[in-house]
Image (tube, coloured by chain):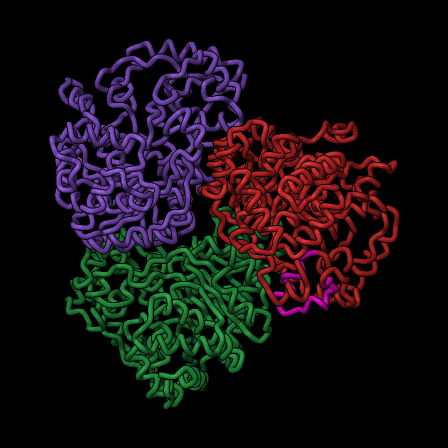
Chain colours: A purple, B red, C green
Amino acid sequence: MPPLTLDPNRLFPADPGTRAIARKLYDGVAQLPIVSPHGHTDPAWFATDDAWDNATALLLAPDHYLYRMLYSQGVKLEALGVPAHGVPGDADPRAAWRIFASSQHLFRGTPSRMWLDHVFAEVFGFEEVLSADTADHYFDRIGDLLATPAFRPRALFDRFNIELIATTEGAHERLDHHDAIRNSSWTGQVVTAYRPDAVVDPEHEDFHASMVAFADLTGEDVMTWRGYLRAHAKRRQDFIARGATSTDHGHQSARTTNLSAADSAALFDRIVGKDWTAQDAELFRAQMLTEMARLSLDDGLVMQIHPGACRNHNSWLHHHYGRDKGADIPGRTDYVGGLKPLLDAFGNEADLSIILFTLDESTYARELAPLAGHYPCLKLGPAWWFHDSPEGMMRFREMTTETAGFYNTVGFNDDTRAFLSIPARHDVARRVDCAFLARLVAEGRLRDWEAQELAQDLTYNLVRKAYRLPEASPRSLASAA
Amino acid sequence: MPPLTLDPNRLFPADPGTRAIARKLYDGVAQLPIVSPHGHTDPAWFATDDAWDNATALLLAPDHYLYRMLYSQGVKLEALGVPAHGVPGDADPRAAWRIFASSQHLFRGTPSRMWLDHVFAEVFGFEEVLSADTADHYFDRIGDLLATPAFRPRALFDRFNIELIATTEGAHERLDHHDAIRNSSWTGQVVTAYRPDAVVDPEHEDFHASMVAFADLTGEDVMTWRGYLRAHAKRRQDFIARGATSTDHGHQSARTTNLSAADSAALFDRIVGKDWTAQDAELFRAQMLTEMARLSLDDGLVMQIHPGACRNHNSWLHHHYGRDKGADIPGRTDYVGGLKPLLDAFGNEADLSIILFTLDESTYARELAPLAGHYPCLKLGPAWWFHDSPEGMMRFREMTTETAGFYNTVGFNDDTRAFLSIPARHDVARRVDCAFLARLVAEGRLRDWEAQELAQDLTYNLVRKAYRLPEASPRSLASAA
Amino acid sequence: MPPLTLDPNRLFPADPGTRAIARKLYDGVAQLPIVSPHGHTDPAWFATDDAWDNATALLLAPDHYLYRMLYSQGVKLEALGVPAHGVPGDADPRAAWRIFASSQHLFRGTPSRMWLDHVFAEVFGFEEVLSADTADHYFDRIGDLLATPAFRPRALFDRFNIELIATTEGAHERLDHHDAIRNSSWTGQVVTAYRPDAVVDPEHEDFHASMVAFADLTGEDVMTWRGYLRAHAKRRQDFIARGATSTDHGHQSARTTNLSAADSAALFDRIVGKDWTAQDAELFRAQMLTEMARLSLDDGLVMQIHPGACRNHNSWLHHHYGRDKGADIPGRTDYVGGLKPLLDAFGNEADLSIILFTLDESTYARELAPLAGHYPCLKLGPAWWFHDSPEGMMRFREMTTETAGFYNTVGFNDDTRAFLSIPARHDVARRVDCAFLARLVAEGRLRDWEAQELAQDLTYNLVRKAYRLPEASPRSLASAA
């Protein structure tokens, strides 16, 4: 059976001279603690510290990168235990795992493969590749290990050297798990982030239910424009009290607008009535980005804008399985026209910080780098989602650095709910950044001491600064030293 | 005079370690037979096995890659013998060849140059580069060789180790040459493919004439919606009987729609009347993609969609010379919105297979890889036309693999009428794929045994599977062994 | 303090074999004279030959690449001495320089950094990097040197081995400085170029004032369509008399149209009245590109089209500081549809020459290379503005060469007002071109003697041919020999 080994020089350029430079840069940052300012881990894990069930429930059924690839090759989601509308699938976990194990060739050349190899080799200690032949061995051993204290969420958090992790909660969601974490004796830093999409997007299937919860949690009359805005301001304070330093906005487009208060109120009345059009919905989301910027000027939360996905593109799958099932497809995104109203209002505010992400790489050099290389309020988030990959990260650096520089970027986001893969993902990012820096050094475009500073900044300092994170805890600083 | 030599390591990365890996991978696939599932060779060649006339008529006058470059530098098409509206040009073939020979510098850095070098060195055995000085030598020797039995179409087909080649015929065209091939004693596999554009696109200049032929060939009343659809179903069976396993659709956009039967019939009535608008024409093409998918579910033909070219962009040239004269220019293409109606109808059908091509590389990572990495019915065709080139193929792999993997792709298409260049084109594709795989191995992203399997799959197995080709003939399997 | 050194092999590929090829190619062109056919140096410099003031006034305050990056990080433009609406800033030059000096890390990985290093090391002879510690040393020494005869404009022009430089003047501007240069005993070739945007774009803030000057300078009734066109024809002759061989057009889009004379006149009447819409303005600019092409057919001026920037995107900055303050942001550009009306009119004219530029790299392979690889009148300008950078230039070659070849390109443009950086910019272009050619040679895609010819052509011959420049002066030819 083929051995599972991780090449210590993986992702470094093949040219021996450049590889040596990359290796040296990487050695300087490989052990830095992980700062994860944007992601989707479940705070319940850290609140309860319960053991996970099995390999399928932990690694396969929740990972849309994995089951979308299997689905594309004709595997049914029900065979993999993927939940439908939140109801856990009833597939036999071992049978699902065997399907996955026998389809590993599909992941050749994908980042999932790099992440999985790292998880299997480093986290679980496997020495043979996953395949049909080793499927049961993997399933059993992972199950056994997950039942041990060393594989509980908090233990792994510490083992992974995570200094801080942010989860994402909706404006309509309670923050009980965060309270439990903060009230516990555990010192791991888990903070939340404010994601109000479900109360901002009238086309979201949970809009009405979310608005009801939003009213409940704030005591505001969220069916009036003023009350609705006050509710946002209040909830943002709730989030800040649980460590949040950022908001997040996942609209389909980057459109913004800046209506008068009267027009905003009139638009809002249509939205909370039932008499709105798709154009009204788009306009309301556009106005809300500007409102969120206005609130950020008050309370200091960093805005993250993640536009460009056509959500739930597969109607049949959406109907039968619900959201977030690997069927979101990116489209063209216009930042130059879309963001102008917001930037006309607040673009020159030095106290505002907006981090832009994209799924449309054609905007890197054309729009995003020129915008971030000019406006004081703008920074560029890292390569995201489909582009959170070695080639994607390299294109990000190649296409943004010359115009925006490195210091208008914000370090790495893992953006994942796949907790066990977090060290793998950060490791890939560090290696790719070091590979890029090494090429610049080898080509006489950057001095070696500058590259060393940059490797530290891209790994650790920029993310803390961009997300306005509190001073690192002593533990973290010790790790970094 | 400069010698003509082919670097045995051409197209492999320069780094010696990576080059050695690429070389080894290539050695494993270099001799595999050629499977050419999509192209534009003339079936008459293989039916009659007549000798070709001369270098200009065979290599220059029909090759739009060549004469478009010369035209861009001020050479008149009539000087090159390019046909006008199907009428062969009356330029002196030798004089045309001399112009071409003295303009070789224009092709530096282009794929035409790599293909020509291969044809001249490997097929004809030249040892000096083509230039003004060697023009006559080339013209004479090529003419002499073409008159020999070894350079007849069937002999070259065998020499080139072609296992199967598909030509492309219109829905309105007879398939007599295919019948002649099948009724002959020659065992070469030449199949057809169903390209109904001329009876699907009301804006095609041959639409009305093609509809008349379509009616004749099917005996259906093609002026009624039902009869028109029955005619398609019938003709598809005619093509299947001549070995066709695929259809092909070259629309300007990727737009689809899924009208009700009544609305489709009403639209069709406008189309076959004269009372249609450009919007109707676009809508009709959009509806016909969905109809073709529906028919494919019945008869199993694989759909190929080749969108994105603005045909006949040069009005003057179109008027004076006709279609396909190097004046088609790509534009932006929207797959995410365009394909949604068809995918809403049939996207989750495991029995449907649609191969998507593009001329808009910005869609590779943004749209096509996410679509093919999710929908069971979708696969990605190889880099096409302007992108069928070393840089273009490499970008295709770099921008699609991380999201769609390798197994949602379908191997190589040469898509050419330049028969003598077919081995050159497949060789370029094999070399570039091996170069890409070698980099992944060198960077620790792929194991060497996986790369070897992939090289075989990308060269041979994926194309046979994706195009649902019958089992290879013993000859082919022997070649592959 | 870190030393300032220039790696003699900078920008060459790291692989030793490829680097050696690149080095040899570069050695063959490094000393060729500079031909600068498009730029924004001030002709007053060469007319008066006055000394420049100080480092800030010469290098920082006029360079939007530099102050836009500082602005993006919160530095105020007034602190840098950037002029507001043409009024020089009153910041202390030394204090401004110190801010710039202490922010050098922002430029890591940017082309500005490469250009500045070259200027500091080669032009001024510094041996330590610019930093907070060396800020005053730099400021003082640059000031001292600028006061010496060797650093006067004409002396540097000669030292830089500039064979010809083109400035850019508006249709409404006097050409007195050019007259003074031509009437002087100095033999440096400084020519103008015709940039009529201010009298072609009704949305330009100086449109009305420019039209008044346009009338004054031509004696034509520019408020009538016929008089307006005659005024253009006259002024073009004025420019030709000052050495102009080209026009330049910086529209937001690439849209063209070809209205009838009557419709053009009616549109013009709306434009010079006050009763026009944004659509009228766009249509008028579109029509004027076609009119300029028509005039070029008469007088032989080469057209340059530089579309795609959303000018003055930052409304607040535009209001307070005026145009050209680093706040122009590129957007998507459609060439295929946009240029069709002009190409339908004149696309096949062998005597017309139009050089296309872009800020939208997604058009390189998709639109621009196919257009230039077909139409006799079209050529591709080099990587421009945000893409005038090592990565940008390399992408230009990688994405255009395979379809348009090298001979539909026109050499390098520095496009700069930063006179001291001109040798640095041309050096970067030569190095990147040699790096690209070296890779093609190393990969067996180009013969070494072809690469040597190409290096000469890309550096020197193509620019002279494309811009229809007069025969080089003996001095230049001697330099080239």
Q: Quadrant of the N terminus of chain B?
A: bottom right
How many tags in the picture? Answer: 0
Query: Toward which corner of the image does residue B76 lie, by quadrant?
Result: bottom right
Whether residue B134 is visible here, answered yes or no, is no
Which picture quadrant has residue A92?
top left
Taking the spot 48% from the left edge, 78% from the top edge, the residue there is C261
* Residue C467 located left or right of residue A415: right
Q: Position of residue B226 (x, y in %)?
A: 64, 39
Please, is residue C161 above or below residue B139 in the view? below
Q: Quadrant of the C terminus of chain B?
A: top right
Residue stretch in magenta: B63-84
Residue B381 % position (x, y): 58, 40
Q: Is residue C115 magenta?
A: no
Q: Examine the image and state in which quarter residue A7 appears.
A: top left
Q: Tell which of C387 and C272 is nearer to you.
A: C272
Closest to the observer: A68 or A367?
A: A68
Decide: is C26 above or below A386: below
Q: Image height check: is A130 above or below B13?
A: above
Residue A323 drawn at (x, y percent): 36, 29
